[in-house]
Amino acid sequence: MTLNAESHTGGHTWKSLPAAQQPDWPDQAALREVIAELESYPPLVFAGECDQLRDRLGAVARGEAFLLQGGDCAEAFDAIGADQIRNKLKTLLQMGAVLTYAGQVPVVKVGRIAGQYSKPRSKPTETRDGVTLPTYRGDSVNGFEFTEKARIPDPQRLKRMYQASASTLNLVRAFTTGGYADLRQVHAWNQDFVKSSPAGQRYEALAREIDRALNFMNACGVDPEEFKTVEFYSSHEALILDYESALTRTDSRTGELYDVSGHMVWIGERTRQLDGAHVEFAARIRNPVGVKLGPTTTPEEALSLIDRIDPNREPGRLTFITRMGADKIRDKLPDLVEKVTASGAQVAWICDPMHGNTFEAASGHKTRRFDDVLDEVKGFFEVHKGLGTHPGGIHMELTGDDVTECVGGGDEIFVDDLHQRYETACDPRLNRSQSLDLAFLVAEMYRDQ
């Protein structure tokens, strides 16, 4: 595999265009120093790995695989310990095992991990008790504490993001290739979940099926290497363009540009302007790219995004991640899918059932109802079944910890419970139990397709 440490010679064309959601860095000289230093750092991922993920997503776009993408709303510098990373990875592996078996389809596993340190915000400032400060934009930009010192954007944090991402990727690679991800072990975790879950009986039949399949292969002396390791990729929103551009390199094999901060990057609903800097940046790199599409997206905008980012109509190059809301998915999605499909483009269609279903509880906590999340996924599957197209996957905000941030689920969390373990830096996440509930339910939906 080629090591693409050679610094990039292009990829700055976005700088002449309007860039939404960028920090207001007070010290531009300090920013330039940090960017120059980042440009000298080695890649976090390799171009060959990005190509491999693009191939896997091509299978998703063709209806031959399913994408499971999940992780934190916003990663935090103080949450890169082995336990937090292992719990997140463990939850995604468990979900992947259920979906692989029930769907009888390969599951491409991609984490919102090792780079998800930046967040777009609806307002540039926040006011509390008459005090107005810059809004928190993620640990890559400023601090969560509501103090003037913490909230000043600090470019040194971009170097901390690189270091935290490198540490996280090192541990993920060790876990996924060192025996921790062995399918038999992952299945044993699922059995433990089934036993303790209020919905356990519903899932027990599926767990028994997996058992029988594994026992049969074992009796036949089949012990494939594929059971012992797992392919796992990293992704994040390409939001802070100075950082992403600094980590863009020219691949020595092909002369193409790759953003080596992660295997896959996506553009958010707030930054997908066709004449904007984020779309221009995405169009120049060879990584697989995602674009979030909200309920206001028109088919014409979707087709224009394809023309800009995927002009060669290459399966796996472009993933549309729809975030409509449970109340809009059935009305807004069909026209998009129908017209994009009619154009001949082969994009992967992924459902993000989190971002369109957020509301504020009486306690002031941002939260989501598990039933709304589930209903949006149901609507997504219904639309694709009606059109004869492929529901390509789900994109989740989740954690492996027992947080109380979303209400509902089999092991039900009530609105009054939110304060107990509300630990997110930004948006509410599903906890491990809710995530696995969802995986079993999505597996049932996939079987019914």
Image (cartoon, grey):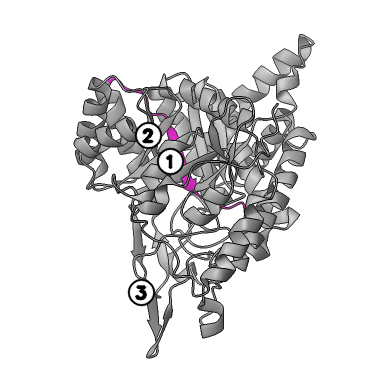
Three-letter amino acid code at disc 1?
A: Ala
Which residue, given by chain and number where applicable, does mark 2 sit on? 309
The magenta stretch spans which residues? 388-400
Q: Residue furthest top?
A: 220
Count how many numbered circles sit on residues in the image.
3
How far apart in space, not on screen, are marks 1 and 2 (Cα)?
Answer: 7 Å
* Whether residue 147 is visible: no
Q: Could you tell me which secondary element the residue under label 2 belongs to?
A: helix
Location of residue 373 with respect to 232 vertically, above or below: below
Kindly report the secondary structure that dominates the magenta region of the rendered protein.
Answer: loop
Three-letter amino acid code at disc 2?
A: Ile
How far apart in space, not on screen, are marks 3 and 2 (Cα)?
Answer: 42 Å
> Quick one: quadrant of the N terminus?
top right
Judge by depth and name the residue closer to the eye, 81 or 344.
344
Q: Which mark is residue 362?
A: 3
Q: Quadrant of residue 177?
A: top right
**Dot placed on the residue nearer the N-terminal end, 3 or 1:** 1
